[in-house]
Image (cartoon, rainbow, N blue to C red):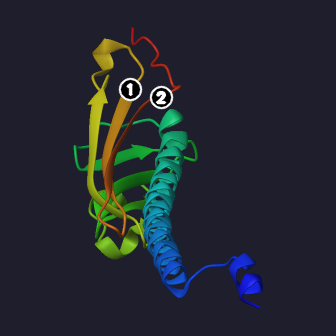
Amino acid sequence: MSKKNKNRSGFTIVELIIAGSLFIIIISIASASFVESIKVQRQLSTLVDANNNTVQALEQIAREVRTGTDFEESTSNVLHFQNFKNEWVAYKLLDNSITKCVGSERECLSAPAARFIPITADNVSIEKLDFFYKGLDPAENWPVRVTIGTQVVSILEIDANLQTTISTRNLREDEE
C-alpha cells in the first residue's frame, strides 16, 4: 500500500492556502479598479449631462438672437432684445440658472425675478453668464454679434466653460 500513496499527486494544505490567498489579493485589486472606474464614469456622465443641458439652453438663445432686433438695452449681465414675434425677450442668470422673460414692450427690463423662467435643469449650476456685443452701433451697418460665455458646474463640482458667438440674420438698411 505504500507504493499507491507515493504515486498519488495533489496539493498540500499549505499550497492551497497560499494559492487561495493570492487569488483573493488579485480579486481585491481588480475589484477596487472596477469600483473606481464606475465612479469616474458616473462623474463623466454627470458632466456630459450638464454640458448637454447648457448647450440646449444656449441653442435656444441662439435661435432667437439670429432673428432678433433692438439689442441696445442689453448689458453684460442681461441679453434683451425683440424676437421675430415682436415680443421683448430677456435672458439673465438668476439663482445659478439661465432664465428667460418674455413680455410686451420693455417690461422684462424691470420685471421681478418671478417673471423669469429657468431654461436649464435643476441639477445644473451656472456660475457665470456673460454677454458681449459687437455691432450695436447702427453706423457700423453690420449685423449684431452676441458672444455668450458660461461656466457650468455639475453636482459633483466639476466645472466647464462654454462659449458661443451668434450673429443676427437681420441686416440693417442704409439710412439715407
**Quarter location, residue 70:** top left
Marks 2 and 1: CB-CB under 8 Å?
A: yes
The alpha-carbon separation of the residues under discs 2 and 1 comes to 6 Å
User: At numbered mark 1, what does the secondary structure look like: helix, strand or loop?
Assistant: loop
**Quarter location, residue 142:** top left
For residue 147, side relative to residue 15 (left or right): left
Q: Residue at x 52, y 73 (%)?
A: 23
For residue 146, side relative to residue 55 (left or right): left
- Report the quarter where the N terminus lies: bottom right
Tell me if residue 24 can be seen. yes
Query: Vertical placement of 140 versus 113: above or below?
Result: above
* Direction bottom: furthest residue: 1
- Residue position for label 1: 144
* Direction front: furthest residue: 2
- Report the quarter where the C terminus lies: top left
Q: Which mark is residue 168?
A: 2
